[in-house]
Image: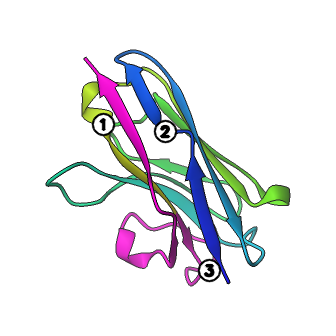
Amino acid sequence: QVRVVESGGGLVQAGGSLRLACTASGRTFSGYAMGWFRQAPGKEREFVAAISWDDNTYYADSVKGRFTISRENAKDTLSLQMNSLKAEDTAVYYCAVRQFGHGSISYYYTEYDYWGQGTQVTVSS
């Protein structure tokens, strides 16, 4: 059974940093793309960052230069380093795994197959 668990969310002041972590278990994920999405109240889930099977990284324009996604295949873990946080980054952040994409990422949350429960990130201004 596949299980995806996020951690590391919390409350931070604008300009601060947080690091999110995601651990996937139940199978080997090294050949899959993985990503981070977020959802603010009343808004649709949106793409934040993703990493392909061969470690190419992709970012939403709104976080480019501030967030860094990385993975450690040996441990099936995914991280998101978030710096220079803004109030508009406040959302529930979700980790996702794309099993059926031949290792390539997608910007659409509907194309990911496994999800964590989410972790709240709140940035106070």
Residue 9 circle label: 2
Disc 2 from disc 3: Cα separation: 30 Å
Q: Residue at x 50, y 79 (%)?
A: 113
**Front in this rendered view, residue 11 or 63:** 11
For disc 3, the marked residue is 102
Q: Residue at x 60, y 80 (%)?
A: 99
In this picture, residue 20 sits left or right of residue 124: right
Please state the extent of the stretch shown in magenta in the rendering: 96-125
Crowding at label 3, few (<14), some or many (≥20) Cα neighbours within 10 Å?
few
| Residue 59 horizontal/vertical position (percent) | 44, 46
In this picture, residue 120 sits left or right of residue 116: left
| Residue 3 horizontal/vertical position (percent) | 63, 72
| Residue 43 horizontal/vertical position (percent) | 17, 55
Q: Is residue 76 above or below residue 91?
A: below
In this picture, residue 64 sits left or right of residue 1: left
Q: Amino acid at mark 1?
A: Thr
Sequence-first disc among 2 and 1: 2
